[in-house]
Amino acid sequence: MTYGCHNRKPLRKWRNVQEGWNPLGTQRLVLTVDPMTKDCQYTHTKLGQADPKCEGCKWRAEKP
């Protein structure tokens, strides 16, 4: 069994977020850049580098 993040689909680059309300009371949405880091942060740690369940994942960070 592997983690749910193992070879997952790429994360979105853009996202709809709410920017206030329209006069009719509905949400006003705008498209903005998603600032979330796209690569795996877990494998930047010692624990993540040693985790055997991360072997073969395309998002795994290279060993320093």
Image: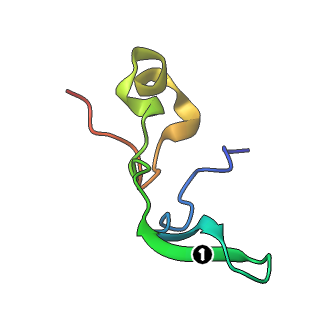
Residue at the location (68% across, 79% down)?
A: 22
Q: Which image quadrant is residue 52 in?
A: top right
Residue at the location (68% across, 50% down)?
A: 4
Say whether residue 62 is left or right of residue 35. left
From this view, report whether residue 24 is shown above or below residue 59.
below
Disc 1: which residue: 29
The quadrant of the rendering that contains the C terminus is: top left
From this view, report whether residue 46 is shown above or below residue 42.
above
Residue at the location (40% across, 53% down)?
A: 35
Q: Amino acid at mark 1?
A: Leu
The colour scheme applied to this rendered structure is rainbow
Numbered circles on residues, count: 1
Point out the residue furthest to the front here. 23
Residue nearest the viewer, comparing 12 with 15: 15
Mark 1 Cα-neighbour bin, 10 Å: few <14, some 14–19, many ≥20: some
Residue 50 place in picture, x, y as percent: 45, 22
From this view, report whether residue 54 is shown above or below residue 30.
above
Residue 29 shows up from this direction: yes
Point out the residue furthest to the left here. 64
Residue nearest the viewer, comparing 34 with 12: 34
Point out the residue furthest to the bottom here. 24
Residue 13 shows up from this direction: no
Residue at the location (36% across, 28% down)?
A: 44
Residue 37 place in picture, x, y as percent: 39, 47
Say whether residue 20 is left or right of residue 11. right
Residue 10 place in picture, x, y as percent: 48, 66
Helix, strand or loop at mark 1: strand
Residue 42 place in picture, x, y as percent: 47, 31
Say whether residue 39 is left or right of residue 20. left
The quadrant of the rendering that contains the N terminus is: top right
